Image (cartoon, grey):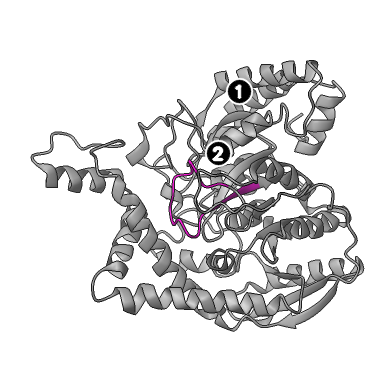
Amino acid sequence: MHQLTLAEIARGLADKKFSSEELTRALLARINQLDPQINSFISVTEDLAISQARAADARRAAGESGALLGAPIGHKDLFCTQGIRTSCGSKMLDNFKAPYDATVVSKLAEAGAVTLGKTNMDEFAMGSANESSYYGAVKNPWNLEHVPGGSSGGSAAAVAARLLPGATATDTGGSIRQPAALTSLTGLKPTYGRVSRWGMIAYASSLDQAGPLARTAEDCALLLQGMAGFDAKDSTSIDEPVPDYSASLNASLQGLRIGLPKEYFGAGLDPRIADLVQASVKELEKLGAVVKEISLPNMQHAIPAYYVIAPAEASSNLSRFDGVRFGYRCESPVDLTDLYKRSRGEGFGPEVQRRIMVGAYALSAGYYDAYYLQAQKIRRLIKNDFMAAFNDVDVILGPTTPNLAWKIGAKNNDPVAEYLEDVYTITANLAGLPGLSMPAGFVDGLPVGVQLLAPYFHEGRLLNVAYRYQQVTDWHTRAPNGF
């Protein structure tokens, strides 16, 4: 049963081939057996999962139906879950049990999804390798010596290892799409505001967006259907109708205009990845798509702009973790200043401290105009580049990552080298656009992903292109050895 996709699980439950409880118990046993190898879970919620599975079976017995009713999933451990530890991968929140459910959690629970547990992640979602977690590094199921990508590496590794068919994740600078690429999954970052951020512990509020990780575009469509929608509790949520994402999956690609930015194929891109990207383009051309070269001239400024804006927002968001109200508190503080210093110094890991300091510096008097304000201007120029490009093309295609998954620890002493792995993904966050990564092949046994970007609220178009591509390729069906 662990090889079934979400869509296949929905059909199996509807046809009474198995119950949600049977499936849930089988996957929980698999997690207990195999997860020690990859460390993809922080908390396994066995009692909750069995309770939800029994409730889903009862709802089906009463005549109810639904694509996610009884389907097992996991939640990235920054979505608040009532009464369950929500750690954000940090010592700071190791003892925090959320008093409420995030909107994403409650919406999926209402749809009948079964929560198997909370997945490991880079601390406060800061990282591209899932090595900064207080609970230890997550390992890539395709090669246990390599990273799975981050910060949603726990969700990605769990789905890739067939421990569960789908999971929630978040994307601030590529943290859904990059781990999807490095573990041979389909990952979708929706338009900013499409999915509620209420109850999702913030890293950088103007960039963070929740989305699904699964093996296929069809499964991502089902998960996004359950997650998306307006939420009055989230001031950044946009009141836009949610289409039926599954209905348009099989639409023709005849005449679809695909743009290839020339800036994506310069120095820094592994030529073997470039070859697989071109191979995916040829497959889409066979399906009727038309390809043209485009330009995104301000892309070169994206990384410096992002690594000013994101840390600046992080330094503001993380100021609440002070040892006073909740979370980690140091032992025997001598005064209030000592309480603040030691609680934060002991509670936050090195990468989080680094970004807080960079952000605080960029926002400080005398530097705000020179750094933060300039970064916001660049952000606008990047958005304008995309708007101009989408006048000529329907989607933009390119590599998701410039390199293959690297070995665990290989970039620990060079944070900038790790930041550069986000070069193709962060522009979508700066502009607020939807983006998707889909499996496109392997190099030396390690997965490669191709990224698609579309105009605002055109997630359906991304899913359609990925679905049609997955009808003529089999990269998404392959499983890691041993899993």
| Relative image position of residue 223 (x, y in whole percent) | 69, 42
Identify the residue under disc 2: 103
Which amino acid type corresponds to the residue marked 1 in the rendered image? Answer: Ala
With respect to residue 153, does 431 lie above or below? below
Residue stretch rendered in magenta on the structure: 196-212
Q: Which numbered mark, 1 or 2, is in the foreground of this view?
A: 2
Which amino acid type corresponds to the residue marked 2 in the rendered image? Answer: Thr
Q: Residues within 10 Å of mark 1 (few under 14, many from 20)?
A: many
Q: Gap in Å between the C-alphas at discs 1 and 2?
A: 18 Å
Q: Which mark is residue 61?
A: none
For the C terminus, the image quarter is top right
With respect to residue 31, does 437 lie above or below? below
| Relative image position of residue 428 (x, y in whole percent) | 59, 66
Q: Residue at x 88, y 53 (%)?
A: 250
Q: Quadrant of residue 38?
A: top right
Q: Is residue 236 left or right of residue 252?
A: left
Q: Please say whether residue 209 is one of the residues in the magenta stretch.
A: yes
Q: Which badge, 1 or 2, is on the more N-terminal residue?
A: 1
Q: Does the magenta stretch mainly form a helix, a strand or a loop? A: loop
Q: Residue at x 67, y 27 (%)?
A: 27
Identify the residue under disc 1: 49
Q: Is residue 198 left or right of residue 383?
A: left
Q: Residue at x 50, y 59 (%)?
A: 207
